Amino acid sequence: MTSRVELCAALADRIRAEARVASPAECCGLLEGLREAGGFRVCALHPARNLSLDMDRFEMDPRDQFAAQRAARESGRAIIGCYHSHPHGAAQPSAADLSGADEEEFLWLIAGAAELRAFVYLRGAFVGADWVTSSE
């Protein structure tokens, strides 16, 4: 079963812009939105500081994570996923991404050197998701 991801062009463009600014390091952040039948609707981004000393890894600042959780609760939504970049690689989950994933049905957006792709972590693996562009 493939999940559907609704993400407006403006938010996708913001992720791409963050990836460009952070390069050669990885950018990272959390996705606020709603889980809906068959997928996800991303409503807001919460950029996070990357504390990793490795250029090809990300480690979100816990303070940014807590702030994002508070903001999502206040809006009546939830943190439904995360995003990060692979500045010199493909928009595919890496072995490090897989080892760091642990929340079932959590959305992962990955900005590669040439594209932005969506995956959902399910039963110990990443499953590709389909995009639906919204006008919001």
Image (cartoon, rainbow, N blue to C red):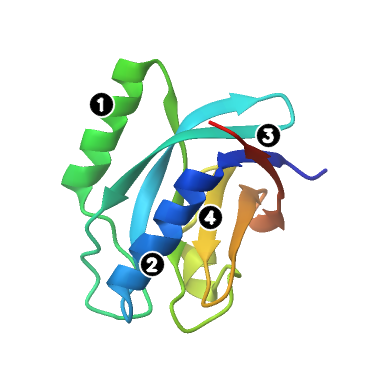
Q: Which residue is mark 2?
A: 19
Give the residue type at disc 4. Answer: Leu
Cα separation, mark 3 vs mark 2, equals: 24 Å
- Disc on the earlier residue, 1 or 3: 3
Q: Position of residue 71 (x, y in %)?
A: 28, 27
Q: Residues within 10 Å of mark 4 (few under 14, many from 20)?
A: many
- Disc on the earlier residue, 2 or 1: 2
Cα separation, mark 3 vs mark 4, equals: 13 Å
- Disc on the earlier residue, 3 or 4: 3
* Residue at 21%, 45% in the rendered image: 64
Tag nearer the camera, 2 or 4: 2
- Disc on the earlier residue, 3 or 2: 2
Cα separation, mark 2 vs mark 1, equals: 24 Å
Cα separation, mark 1 vs mark 4, equals: 21 Å
Q: In the shown orientation, is residue 132 left or right of residue 98?
A: right
Q: Position of residue 13 (x, y in %)?
A: 47, 55
Give the residue type at disc 1. Answer: Arg
Q: In the shown orientation, is residue 132 left or right of residue 76?
A: right
In the image, residue 43 sits, relative to residue 104, either above or below, namely above
Residue 41: which disc?
none
Quadrant housing the N terminus: top right
Q: Can the viewer see residue 13?
A: yes
In the image, residue 74 sits, relative to residue 95, either above or below, namely above
* Residue at 25%, 63% in the rendered image: 50
Task: Name the image quarter holding residue 114.
Answer: bottom right
In the image, residue 125 sits, relative to residue 67, either above or below, namely below
Residue 109: which disc?
4
Q: Which residue is mark 3?
A: 39
The reply to whether callout 2 and callout 1 are in contact (CB within 8 Å) is: no
Residue 70: which disc?
1
